Image: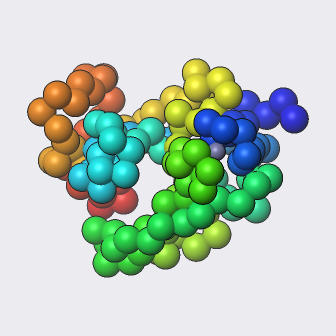
């Protein structure tokens, strides 16, 4: 499939492709994203789950989100690459981590969020709007 939003994990066991534009695209700088990625932030896109075709089975790790709901992070059980996210307060939605795209240039972030907890060495695009906390607040 030649979707703009197609990608895979590092070992190739999990592939996905979305046939619509993301509903949201932004960089999350929260501490949980730093911890789970080992990096400064997670470049995140949000799609309706029904528009994303996944082959292979991701394993999900659940943690408490800032909202009080749960945040499940989907990763490849073989190579450990993080691909997906599911949020209890956003039913029917699937987050995709933009670094897994075959062509990551299709990711166009609209804002930086949870910047209050950003690492001191986290360089952000000064042109993008910044939110101290949640992108929804
Ligand atoms: Zn893999
Ligand atoms: Zn985060």
Instruction: Determine the residue located farthest toward the right in the rendered image.
Output: 1
Instruction: Determine the residue located farthest toward the left in the rendered image.
Output: 120
The residue that appears at 30% across and 50% down in the rendered structure is 35
Could you tell me residue 103's position as x and y percent? Answer: 65, 24
Question: Toward which corner of the image does residue 129 lie, by quadrant?
Answer: top left
Instruction: Tell me if I can see residue 136 in this picture.
Output: yes
Near-viewer residue (103 or 137)? 103
Taking the image in four quarters, ligand 1 sits in the one at top right
Question: Toward which corner of the image does residue 56 lie, by quadrant?
Answer: bottom right
Image quarter (top left, top right, bottom left or bottom right) of the N terminus: top right
Image quarter (top left, top right, bottom left or bottom right) of the C terminus: bottom left
Instruction: Tell me if I can see residue 45 in this picture.
Output: no
> Image check: 86 left or right of 115?
right
Question: Toward which corner of the image does residue 12 lie, by quadrant?
Answer: top right
Could you tell me residue 44's position as x and y percent? Answer: 48, 44
The residue that appears at 71% across and 48% down in the rendered structure is 14
> Image check: 79 left or right of 44?
right
> Image check: 4 left or right of 135?
right
Instruction: Determine the residue located farthest toward the front in the rendered image.
Output: 78
Protein image colouring:
rainbow
Near-viewer residue (65 or 112)? 65
The residue that appears at 60% across and 56% down in the rendered structure is 77
Q: Is residue 92 above or below residue 55?
A: below
Could you tell me residue 51's position as x and y percent? Answer: 76, 55
Could you tell me residue 18's position as x and y percent? Answer: 74, 45
Q: How many marks?
A: 0
The residue that appears at 33% across and 41% down in the rendered structure is 38
């Amino acid at each position: 499939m030649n979707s703009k939003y197609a990608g895979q994990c590092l070992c190739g066991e999990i592939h996905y492709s979305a046939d619509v534009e993301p509903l949201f695209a932004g960089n999350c700088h929260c501490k949980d994203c730093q911890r789970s990625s080992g990096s400064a932030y997670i470049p995140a896109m949000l799609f309706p789950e029904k528009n994303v075709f996944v082959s292979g089975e991701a394993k999900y790790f659940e943690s408490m989100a800032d909202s009080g709901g749960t945040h499940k992070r989907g990763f490849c059980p073989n190579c450990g690459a993080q691909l997906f996210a599911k949020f209890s307060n956003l039913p029917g939605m699937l987050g995709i981590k933009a670094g897994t795209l075959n062509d990551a240039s299709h990711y166009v972030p609209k804002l930086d969020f949870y910047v209050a907890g950003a690492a001191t060495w986290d360089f952000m695009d000064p042109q993008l709007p910044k939110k101290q906390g949640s992108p929804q607040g």
